[in-house]
Image (cartoon, helix red, strand yellow):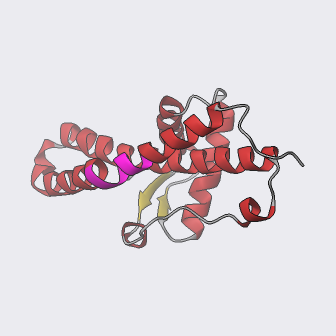
Amino acid sequence: MDDFSVIELRDVLLSLDVSFTDKEDARQYVYRQILSFEKNGWLTSLGKRRDKRYSITDKFRAQSFAPKRDEKVKSSSCVGNIIEILVQEKKEYEAELAITLGEVEEYQSLLNRFPIDEGILIPLFDAAKERSAKERSAKLLGKVNALTNRLQVKNSKVSLC
């Protein structure tokens, strides 16, 4: 997703993630993620307050994302900690998926709104579709599904604290 607002990204997240039931919670989560991405130099912003829009940087495009190895998993066998970790990982993957799918949707929107820029937008749109469809979307969706399935298993055999 490129050239998006917090609200637009929140709406995509809400459409993809049933665990977010409150729009305000989803907006806060998205905003925290955006701030983190901005701090890392992966996003830039233009505008102020509600008119602020975010764009992906070349530094973001050059990244190869892999799940973090969380030391908590090694040091703790508490069900609560494991569930918290899995829920957080799932939310992160869902946000990445929303960004990936949003980029393709935004190029479609730009093509519809500005057909005069077709020569510029078509190659960008095609590249975004390739990245989205073949690589990131399928992998991210698979990760989200795996975590969702694990979280749905309530009585798994994990020792309590």
Magenta stretch contains residue 135: yes
- Number of labels in the image equals 0
User: What residue is drawn where x is 59% and y is 45%?
Assistant: 91
Q: Residue 118: give x, y in percent of width and height.
A: 12, 49
**Identity of the residue furthest to the front in this view:** 157
Compared to residue 18, the image places residue 100 above or below, namely: below
Residue 40 place in picture, x, y as percent = 56, 71
Is 72 a magenta residue?
no
The residue at 76%/62% (across/down) is 72
**Main SS category, magenta section:** helix
Q: Residue at x 21, y 57 (%)?
A: 127
- Looking at the image, residue 111 lies above or below residue 134: above
Residue 51 visible in the picture: no
The answer to whether residue 144 is left or right of residue 1 is right
Residue 36 figure quarter: bottom right
* Residue at the extreme right: 161
Q: Is residue 149 above or below residue 110?
A: above
| Residue 147: percent from left, percent from top | 57, 42
Which of 154/132 is in front? 154
Closer to us: 26 or 133: 133
Q: Position of residue 77 (x, y in %)?
A: 80, 54
The residue lying toward the viewer, choosing from 155 and 141, is: 155
User: Does residue 37 appear in this view?
Assistant: yes
Name the residue at 48% across, 47% down. 143
Drawn side of residue 158 relative to residue 126, left or right? right
Taking the image as shown, residue 7 lies to the left or right of residue 103, namely: right
Region in magenta = 134-140
